[in-house]
Image: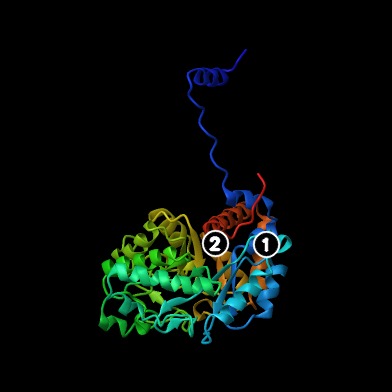
Amino acid sequence: MFSAAFAALVAAASIGVQAPAAPAPDPAESVLRTMSLPQKVGQLFMVGTPADEVDRATRAQIGRFHVGNVMLTGRSYGGVDAPARVSRTMQREVSRSATAGVRLFVATDQEGGLVRVLQGPGFSDIPTALEQGTWSTRTLRQRAATWAGELRRAGVNLNLAPVMDTVPSRRAAKHNPPIGGYDREFGFTTTRVARHGVAFLKGMRDGGVASTVKHFPGLGRVRANTDTSAGVTDRVTRRDDPYLKPFRAGIDAGAPFVMMSTAFYARLDPKNPAAFSRFVVTTMLRGDLGFRGVVISDDLARARQVASVPPAQRALRFIRAGGDVVLTVDPDPLPAMYGAVLDRARSSQAFRATVNAAALRVLRAKDPQGLLPRVAP
């Protein structure tokens, strides 16, 4: 006897109606199935190397620890050739045994003003974000597309920008070292920051470079820099804060990455830095703002804000909170960080599921950049 489903298919065919097509396979899921657990864990790390010189330790970690992402750090003033050579060298470490053939995100900080890792011939003299905020959004998007093309020629496919932090005023900027102190804000209203941040993001995408909205939930109202100070605390940001508007705009515009702040937020989770807070990462960013992309940490290697936490715990706390990619600008802490995550994934089924979900998000972000290998169906 035919089943009811089969009978329905026969009836549909008899009147010329085609059965619904099967959904297209997810390339990222297909790649994930080919990866070992150590390789999946490796996708959850981004390790620094000088922009103009290959760090031998970082290079070796791609094979030894299956590291899936690198960041060009410091300052390079010689133009395109040096960072392009570093990027090529790192990408050549990709193999089936190292990363299951998945190519690297090669990231850098190319915001403008004093925050420009790559400089010299072939790179524009990008002004500060504060000056970019005086342009029309159309102009900013066009110029950002040009800057993205320059990054692509240097082998960079991920920009850790734009900054979506809002500083309340010019006066407040004088007391805000991480953002206002360097004119990294697009302006002093959330509307301007949102509009121009989105224009920057779209321009990067137009030029073929993925971008990162940062530093959630905002560093525009703190009075110290988490890179150089401990105990940095925002005492005003609330769950429904209007200063979250630029982050929401960036997410709605399709930002593939969001970078977490490591400041404390007294009205959100006074006990944990934002990067280690499940409430901030999962409840607010994933839940309230609906972000489905990759959550990356701010630097967890050298930042004074997290120096009191052992490196292994920094990585574990970030991933437990809902984070995906641990950024360590220094390769030295990587073995302890990687080992702790791998050990926990091996011993805990729940944590292993968390690692699998995070690795899948990273692979899905890599797919539009052409970084996934072809996998036979």
Tag 2 residue: 324
Image coordinates for residue 130, horizontal then vertical, percent: 32, 78
Residue at the location (68% across, 55% down)? 35
Q: Considering the image in quadrants, where does the C terminus appear?
A: top right
Q: Residue furthest top?
A: 1
- Judging from the image, what secondary structure is the residue with disc 1 in? helix
Query: Does residue 200 appear anywhere in the picture?
Result: yes
Say which residue appears at 31% left-offset and 71% top-offset.
Answer: 139
**Number of marks in the image?**
2
Q: Is residue 21 above or below residue 167?
A: above
In the image, 320 versus 189, the foreground residue is: 189
x, y percent for residue 167: 31, 76
Query: Which quadrant of the view contains residue 110?
Result: bottom left
282 to the left or right of 187:
right
Name the side, left or right, on which 318 lies relative to 102. Answer: left
Q: Indicate the amino acid at tag 2.
A: Asp
Which kind of residue does numbered mark 1 sit on? Thr
Frontmost residue, 183 versus 261: 183
**Between residues 249 and 217, which one lies in front from this camera angle?**
249
Whichever of labels 2 and 1 marks the residue nearer the N terminus, that label is 1
Q: Which labelled disc corresponds to residue 99? A: 1
| Percent coordinates x, y for residue 7 in the rendering | 55, 17
Residue 160 seen from this side? no
Nearer to us: label 2 or label 1: 1
Q: In this view, does 213 lie above or below 80?
A: above
Label 2 Cα neighbours within 10 Å, binned few <14 / some 14-19 / many ≥20: many
Left or right, 325 with reference to 234:
right
Q: Mark 1 and mark 2 in contact (Cβ < 8 Å)? A: no
Of all residues shown, which one is farthest toward the bottom? Answer: 77
